[in-house]
Amino acid sequence: MSKLPFVTRRRFMMAAGSAAALGVSSARGQGRLQVNPGESQLPIAIPAFVPGTAADGQVGADIAGVITNNLRRSGLFAPIDPAAFIERITNIDVAPQFQSWKQINAQDLVTGRVTRQGDGRLKAEFRLWDVGTAQQLTGQQYVTSPEYWRRIAHIISDQIYERLTGEKGYFDTRVVFIDESGPSERRVKKLAIMDQDGANVRYLTRGADLVLTPRFSPSTQEITYMEFGQGDPRVYLYNIETGQREIVGNFPGVSFAPRFSPDGQRIIMSLQQGGNANLFVMDLRSKSTTRLTDTPAIDTSPSYAPDGSRICFESDRGGKPQIYVMAAGGGSAQRISFGDGTYSTPVWSPRGDYIAFTKQGNGEFAIGIMKPDGSGERILTSGFHNEGPTFAPNGRVLMFFRDPGGNSGPSLFTVDVSGRNELRVPTPGYASDPAWSPLLS
Amino acid sequence: MTAKDLIRKLRERKGTVLSVTLHVLVLGWGLVSFSARSLEAPEDVIPVDISMDDTSKMMQGIKTGKKENPKPLADKIGETKPIDDAVGKIDRKEVVTSTSAPDPTPKPVEKPIEKKPDPKPEPKKEEPKQAEKKPDQKADDPIADALKADAKKPPPKQETKAAPPQPPKPKERTFDQSKIAALLDKRDPSRQAVAGETLNSNAALGTPTGHANALVATWKGAFVSAVRRCFNFPYNGTDADQFEVDIDIQLRPDGSVASDPVIVATRGPSSSVSRALAESAKRAVVQCQAYAFLPKNQYDTWKYIPMTFGLKDML
């Protein structure tokens, strides 16, 4: 009689052990088989886009190259080396030979074509195929001036990313940053803008005046930044399209650390008042200014939550710089950072789920994230000097700058919010203070 | 003495007879219940000792197996793979095949140089036969075995003299510089032989008692492994463990997908990610079909499979 329970229990334990090792478990107690992904990187094949004429061959290959680079750098895709391709795509209007793509373990396949229209504009078409089920997942076509071919490649990258991950992409974006050149004691700092992958760098200022903390408008192609002109440092507004520049407000003393509200209608910033600094918000239409804090401390680096209801900011009101959260209209602030060291440059994720920060302690500067209530702190990278995090528009990737010190200069890096996939962003020279734009399209 | 005399004597000594009978019963019951438990044990271990890819094979019997031999063969008996001996480590001292029983003593193979060639052939060990006759009493309890072994105090070299049926030809002792790594490898060279070529060492008709539960667990593991090979989902958020999608799958007897997998429920902080996850999971199920390894005689247990796809291991 005692044999049965003994054997049954033992067998159950054995089976459970082996099941756990295999990833088999009962989900929610309903006897469901649990499966987790084999890989977090999707093997994808991106052959060169088929050219309409021989002259379009280069741009066809280049578009595929930009898409490949984007997807690879995301860390979520594993583009397959074109040398392994068996089938040569010559016509995107017929279904590919899926077996030959299966053979090289491609899970998805991108086929495309570039043709020159009668008006000289470039037409790019693409199809995304699921190799295993031989079904087209998405297909689009775009027409643009030939010089914007990279933009088309970024847009197609976003389409692929969104279709396969379920999240908005971040490839059709730009980054504004401070380009640094010259020796460390006479460093020239210019405001510059580039595509998120480091291409198409354009300089917005000539480097005569020192510029700092550029920030993108969430809704327009404008940036706000601080510039040391002839007088006190001031916050400026700059239109990227027109090149028009204006001072934000007319305040006595120094204004700094500006950032747009989520609707792009207001700019929140710090104003120096004696030895203190407080937060103010200015409506860009009415030019009216509202004080948000009034403390004998330095309140700075304000950043709105994506819904505009709250702001996070840095303050040393408790003795040393920490991160606080308060209602967007002001009022009592709640401290959310309690770890060792000091916390600065908080920035709220466009998703709303995290606040990124620079943390200083033990002689190191780390980039980290925490939830808006201060829980779940996670350090993503640390070292001698990392600073100034900025979120990609989908909130999954952060860009920051790292300065190794000495005679060297800073560089830009990206890292996932999970702390993985740290990559250097190519820039022509030293670079700091990046700010990621919203999606352009 | 006639039968009547015997009966009479027995009547005279009722107490003794009763006592003897009771003792026999009690001892017999103890023996039966004791052996019954240990007999079951190896069968219990079988479904656990599996590799992911060959779970079904491991449970499968061999048609030519003998019915009266329901126990699995001891793993280490029989042919071993030739061992790549870097230098012909010792002459005339063939690397021995382990016996069926777990060897509680350290194997002297690790120090072949110290071993003297033993001119006296040791009497053949009984393990192979024992393993076939009473495998359960043997390999079931390693601690008891170890105690027994201690009690007998067998010399270490006897343990290794399992008398291979055909001793390999002695190798000439050589030194190959390119095989220094192998020389430094102090692991038992017979480990490769133990791994063996035959994954199915169970030369029986299958377990006669029909462990349906264990078999179900086995095909489930194999099925999950198969689907997992096609299920890659790109995600880099920190909330991966919150995403789950329930998908019901119907299969034909040949293991192919009978109809479009049905998304029953999706959970997660982002509906668009959950939807992409669900579609990706459906594609994986279709892509990796047909699941021909599923045991046909248990079609009832897998013709309908409720599954949950999640992102738990992605952080």
Image: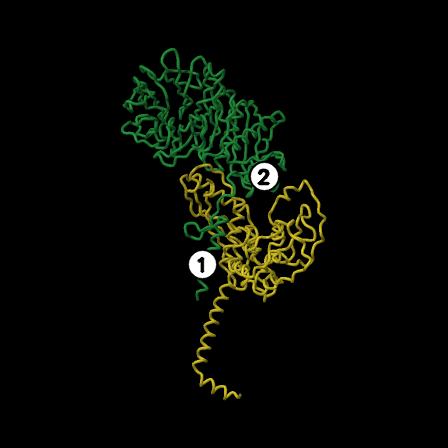
Chain colours: A green, B yellow
Residue A245 lies, with reference to residue B280, above or below; the image says: above
What residue is at 53 percent from the left and 26 percent from the top?
A: A150
User: As shown in the figure, which amino acid type bears the numbered disc 1?
Assistant: Arg
The quarter holding residue A337 reads: top left
User: As shown in the figure, which amino acid type bears the numbered disc 2?
Assistant: Ala
User: Residue farthest to the top?
Assistant: A230
What residue is at 44 percent from the left and 82 percent from the top?
A: B14
Q: How many marks?
A: 2
| Numbered mark located on residue A232 in the image | none
User: What is the chain identity of the residue bearing mark 1?
Assistant: A
Q: Position of residue B73 (x, y in %)?
A: 59, 60
Judged from the image, the secondary structure of the residue bearing numbered disc 1 is helix
* Gap between marks 1 and 2 measured at Cα: 54 Å
Whether residues under marks 1 and 2 lie with C-beta atoms below 8 angstroms apart, the answer is no
Residue A389 lies, with reference to residue A251, above or below; the image says: below
The quarter holding residue A267 reads: top left
> B276 left or right of B130?
left
- In the picture of the structure, the residue carrying the numbered disc 1 is A9
Q: Position of residue A346 (x, y in %)?
A: 38, 28
Judged from the image, the secondary structure of the residue bearing numbered disc 2 is loop
Q: Is residue A440 visible?
A: no
The quarter holding residue A440 reads: top left
User: What is the chain identity of the residue bearing mark 2?
Assistant: A
Q: Nearer the viewer, mark 1 or mark 2?
A: 1
Q: Position of residue B211 (x, y in %)?
A: 51, 60
Query: Between A113 and A239, which is closer to the camera in this rendering?
Result: A239
Same chain? Circles 1 and 2? yes
Q: Earlier in the sequence, mark 1 or mark 2?
A: 1
What residue is at 47 percent from the left and 53 percent from the top?
A: A16
- In the picture of the structure, the residue carrying the numbered disc 2 is A95
Q: Position of residue A396 (x, y in %)?
A: 44, 33
